[in-house]
Amino acid sequence: MLRSGPPWQRRLRLDAALGAGGGALAVLVGGVVGLLDDQPAAAIGVSACGAATVGWAIYRQLQSTPTAVPPNTEPAARPVNAPAWNIPPPVRGFIGRDGDLAALGEGLADHGPVGMVAVTGLGGMGKTQLALWYASIQREHRHVSVGWLLNASSRGYLLDGLARLSATLALPESSSVEVAAARALGEIVRRPGWLLVYDDAKDQATLDGLLPLSGPGQVIITSRYADWRGSVALMPVDELDYETGADFLQARARDGDRAAALDLAHRLGGLPLALEQAAAYCRNGGIRLRDYLNRFEVAPATLLSTGHPYGLRPVARTWLVNLAAVRRSDRAAVELLSFLAFVAPVALPRDVLLRSLPTALPRRLRRAVREDRSFDAVVALLTDLSLLVAQPDGLYVHALVQEVMRERIAWRERRLPWGWTRRRWIGSLLRILAEEFPAEGHTVDQWERCAELRPHAEAALSLSDQLGPWPPAAASLAHLLAHYLRDRGEYADACNLLESATTAAVRELGRYDNRTVTYMMCLGWALQKTGDLGRARALYERMLDGVVIIDNGRVTFTTPAEHDDRARLTCMNNLAHTLSEQGEFGLAGDINKRVLAGRRRILGDDDPETMRSWNGLAVVLGRQGHYIRARRILENVLPYQRRELGDDHPDTLNVINSLATVLHDQGDLNGARALQEEELDRRRRVLGDDHPTTLIAMNHLADTLAELGAGGRADRLRHECDKRAQK
């Protein structure tokens, strides 16, 4: 039986026989996967056993199954121009792709002598289902003489598919599969209204010579390969939006929990195959979407590798096939994908890697990032296989691909604990981000860079937290991120980060390390901004224990002023500010004078920190009622700030605010109003309308306007302030 008919027909009967040996074939494939996973000894044994079992199953099946065409029997004649259709119907509940369907139709109608479109994207994006839906619509609304789905994952499979089409069209038999394929292509170009779907094409070379180049028909290619050229129009497909993904989950799983559906759609990144896999898991297992979400949070990679919705491979396995191809081509690309598995699922700026520390990356990737063209080649390889999206603003990897990669790294870590483990990858990312994140003391001109790096810093810190106590690099990055958040007015989040950074620094570096002291002072400042003045004061007093003693409303300094260094003066200054906020103006003034003298001695009269001390002293004097002295100090400091730092610098705006307050308290309402108008205008432009400091400036101006009789505008400002504060 194996020898009857042309070779390609014998191969078709062999394909049918393999159905009976499917289980054994899985054993054989498992062995081959073992080879790829660096377990050659076990893999060879399993493969040998699987091969023997497969052979026996095939032999038994061939003995019991009649041939499709008995020997010496001519196949039944088919009518000329008989319709041929093997495209299966799409899955039920196909939603959210109306725009893509329209774009696909337009691309096929407008491109070349033969409409030819390559639908590209990450595995699991729904490319094949999009093609199947288009085919079903075409079949329903127009006469289609040929509609044929071809497995284009290899040239051999593609030739076999075209040979099957030749047989279905009742073309003359040939002993050569290539000749049969050519006859099929030659026949369909003479027929009206045909559609060929080349599914899962590996690359453009696989299809060379096997595409129709003329005729009234259309060709859809689905592929994870993205570099299609020539007469093929490119159509990338993206994830579903979360609302549509939630609709799909609720419809497929028959679950009315909208919140759970939205959470799960977000967690799955809107990936259609992952959504279908989750819905099938819930439906088949009789569980709700919320239950699946809880399981996913515990073991995401396991669920991504589980289930076969509509006979499809689980989403994780579709990516591992591509990953194996990457590993064979360029190990630096695998290392890049591994690194990107630990960043946030948003674009990472390229220069983060290109300017990375020499020792922070593994050997192959380190060599690649040193030279632009080498790095471009690595990126292009991953992009061509749709494992990575190269955007103008950086490199992006889908969240579920990241989950699979992290699980794969964890799996290898259990077998090769001396290699690049999760902790080592995260440590590398922490060091690189800490080097790239703008240093503390930055102004708003660096906020855009901070905003680019923020999600990646938060992701790295979160993953580091899952693996145990923070290393020093995590504390350093948390401190930089917290400084940015504090400047943006996100005080609570800044406090949480700084508390974690301080705890890690005390444990790893000791209480008296300079970095630990810096983190503690920043924590105290953030606590002040949240209004927790008691904790802030206690923290500063603990840091100054043995240097500053506050007892019975008096301040005692136990060390000579000459021993004060810059860090101690900063801590004293922060303590004075906290005491002033608590109404302890006398204590605050005494400490401010000591800080001012120390800064003038160490830093000089024109240093910005010295100017801040003058401002702090003037604020205390103003609150004590010494308006003339306070006004004189501020009117001397403000021109210097404008000249040296600029009108929009935070220190300049703070002095404007302080002087406006003194003028208001003196009764010079018009003078106060002019400064408050300037401050509010600049704060809006620099910080934004919703920043807490902007809202404070808005309230101050509203109070002054009300006292001046401009009640209408004052009410409008207060209404705007209340509305923005509620956001």
Image (cartoon, rainbow, N blue to C red):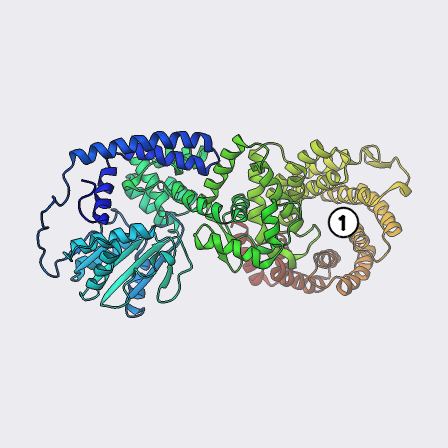
**Residue 488 or residue 44, whichever sits in front:** 44
The structure residue drawn at horizontal position 23% and vertical position 49%, both measured from the top left corner, is 8
Whole-percent x, y for residue 73 in the image: 9, 47
**Helix or strand or loop: what does disc 1 sit on?**
helix
Quick check: 78 left or right of 180?
A: left
Task: Please tell me in which quadrant of the rendered image residue 372 appears.
Answer: bottom right
- Using the image, determine if residue 3 lies above or below residue 710: above
Residue 190 at what x, y percent from top left?
A: 19, 66
Q: Nearer the viewer, residue 284 or 162?
A: 162
* Residue where numbered disc 1 is placed: 623
Total of numbered circles in the picture? 1
Q: Using the image as rendered, state which of residue 465 and residue 547 is in the foreground.
A: 465
Identify which residue is drawn at 29% across, 53% down.
Answer: 158
- Judge from the rendering whether residue 491 lies leftward or rightward of residue 63; answer left or right: right
Q: Is residue 689 something one can see in this rendering?
A: no
Please determine whether, in this image, residue 666 is positioned above or below residue 342: below
Q: Residue at x 48, y 43 (%)?
A: 402
Residue 373 drawn at (x, y percent): 57, 59
Q: Amino acid at mark 1?
A: Arg
* Corner quadrant of residue 711: bottom right
Residue 191 picture location, percent across and down: 17, 65
